[in-house]
């Protein structure tokens, strides 16, 4: 168990890392590198194709209907209904659209408002590691202490004993992310059950980030809120960006027991207040798409995973087959690179591809556990992935 990467500055004016450096991300550096070199950007996880046409058409129609002013604070009632219907259809959950559903500016604002509302200074917040980079910053902004339990290759499931010993009465929130960015793992049922057991024993809340809920390939997605005893202490967070390839719309939501939604809403009203009027009805259309449309989204990505996975293997990487998300982790050690950050800086030159080191998602940027591991995104058009695979093939020669 380790402390997280970010601290608030003494003046509380921003975030600094252990070296006192002001927070910046490797994603910005790598995306700039992609632009400068013309390399294929498999660093940042955004799709380069539009999602379902019905969803896009509804946004246009909503703008034309004049839905361009502030929507209601908790989100449009119709979207809240669509979120509740979606939870019922796929998972048998039935949050009340009036009070148990809150629409947010992406999953990120749902996470921010939740942590700011529920974490007291010094409370511990436990996440798995590596973790989506916003977690560290948001926990620090909320004044919490970030604790982590490692997910290790090859399966990236936590060690149950490490998890048990990381949770105590000081733990306010266990923050789970499944399917998991950056590893692509889908946490197994036993892990989710253990999280619920520990949360109950230590009276902790569970926050679950399920933005990749529809992007699973070999296993079903199990929301932790469906497990016995979980719903009353769980805040479930998701968003439309990944499912409908609309990451720029930033329409997210959370579902939780009423009193938690009320507490979180009071913070949310002072963050963005509201966002994305025309994108809310469009996301409602997405959430009401028939089952085959959701299956098609995952199937399309599965073939991209297989294409890039095969290319990485052929280029000499060991790869870890992801069961979800649109990320694949590859080990560059077999190619003679022990330092993934150095490797990623060289990769545009060597192969015309941009990727990010897994250490970017870790507390200790030099953790030997992840030193040679690299994350590639495969949410790109087939011809783009083929170009990347061609370039990666040059690494062997
Ligand atoms: C695990 C995870 N949570 C949240 C987000 C952000 O979601 P949104 O764009 O809806 O704020 C991302 C985006 O990459 C993510 O990977």
Image (tube, rainbow, N blue to C red):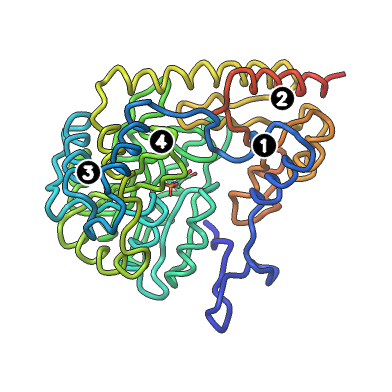
Ligand 1 neighbours mark 4 (CB distance < 8 Å): yes
Q: CA distance from mark 2 to mark 3?
A: 43 Å
Query: Residue 309: x and y, percent?
Result: 61, 20
Q: Upstream in the sequence, badge 4 or badge 2? A: 4
* Residue position for label 1: 374
Q: Upstream in the sequence, badge 2 or badge 3? A: 3
* Residue position for label 2: 317
Instruction: Tell whether label 3 touches label 2 (CB within 8 Å).
Output: no
Circle 3 crowding by C-alpha within 10 Å: few under 14, some 14–19, many from 20: many
* Residue position for label 4: 212
Circle 1 crowding by C-alpha within 10 Å: few under 14, some 14–19, many from 20: many
Closer to the eye: label 3 or 1: 3
Closer to the eye: label 4 or 3: 3
- Name the foreground residue: 163 vs 106: 106
Q: Upstream in the sequence, badge 4 or badge 1? A: 4
Q: Is residue 22 left or right of residue 296?
A: right
Ligand 1 neighbours mark 2 (CB distance < 8 Å): no
Image height of 368 relative to 167, above or below: above
Circle 4 crowding by C-alpha within 10 Å: few under 14, some 14–19, many from 20: many
Circle 2 crowding by C-alpha within 10 Å: few under 14, some 14–19, many from 20: many
Q: Secondary structure at mark 2?
A: loop
Query: Residue 11: x and y, percent?
Result: 56, 84
Instruction: Tell whether label 2 touches label 1 (CB within 8 Å).
Output: yes
Q: CA distance from mark 4 to mark 3?
A: 19 Å
Query: Residue 220: x and y, percent?
Result: 33, 25
Q: Quadrant of residue 36?
A: top right
* Quarter of the image with the C terminus in it: top right
């Amino acid at each position: 168990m380790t402390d997280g990467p970010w601290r608030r500055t003494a003046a509380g004016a921003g975030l600094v890392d252990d070296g006192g450096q002001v927070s910046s991300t490797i994603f910005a550096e790598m995306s700039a590198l992609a632009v400068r070199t013309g390399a294929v950007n498999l660093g940042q996880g955004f799709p380069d194709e539009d999602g379902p046409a019905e969803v896009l058409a509804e946004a246009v129609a909503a703008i034309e209907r004049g839905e361009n002013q502030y929507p209601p604070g908790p989100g449009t009632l119709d979207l809240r209904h669509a979120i509740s219907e979606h939870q019922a259809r796929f998972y048998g959950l039935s949050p009340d659209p009036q009070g148990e559903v809150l629409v947010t500016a992406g999953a990120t604002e749902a996470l921010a408002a939740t942590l700011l509302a529920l974490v007291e200074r010094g409370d511990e917040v436990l996440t798995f590691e590596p973790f989506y980079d916003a977690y560290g910053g948001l926990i620090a902004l909320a004044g919490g202490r970030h604790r982590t339990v490692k997910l290790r290759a090859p399966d990236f499931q936590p060690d149950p004993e490490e998890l048990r010993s990381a949770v105590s009465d000081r733990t306010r929130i266990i923050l789970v992310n499944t399917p998991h960015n950056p590893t692509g793992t889908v946490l197994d049922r036993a892990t989710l059950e253990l999280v619920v057991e520990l949360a109950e024993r230590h009276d902790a809340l569970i926050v679950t980030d399920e933005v990749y809920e529809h992007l699973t390939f070999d296993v079903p997605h199990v929301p932790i809120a469906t497990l016995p005893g979980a719903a009353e202490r769980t805040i479930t967070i998701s968003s439309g960006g990944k499912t409908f390839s609309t990451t720029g719309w930033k329409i997210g939501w959370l579902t939780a027991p009423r009193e938690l939604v009320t507490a979180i809403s009071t913070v949310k009203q002072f963050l963005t207040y509201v966002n994305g009027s025309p994108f809310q009805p469009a996301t409602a259309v997405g959430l009401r798409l028939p089952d085959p449309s959701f299956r098609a989204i995952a199937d399309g990505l599965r073939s991209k995973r297989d294409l890039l996975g095969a290319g990485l293997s052929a280029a000499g990487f060991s790869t870890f087959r992801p069961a979800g998300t649109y990320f694949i982790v590859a080990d560059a050690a077999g190619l003679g690179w022990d330092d993934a950050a150095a490797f990623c800086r060289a990769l545009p030159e060597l192969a015309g591809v941009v990727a990010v080191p897994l250490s970017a998602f870790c507390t200790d940027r030099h953790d030997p556990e992840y030193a040679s591991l690299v994350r590639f995104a495969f949410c790109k058009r087939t011809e783009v992935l083929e170009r990347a695979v061609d370039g990666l093939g040059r690494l062997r020669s």
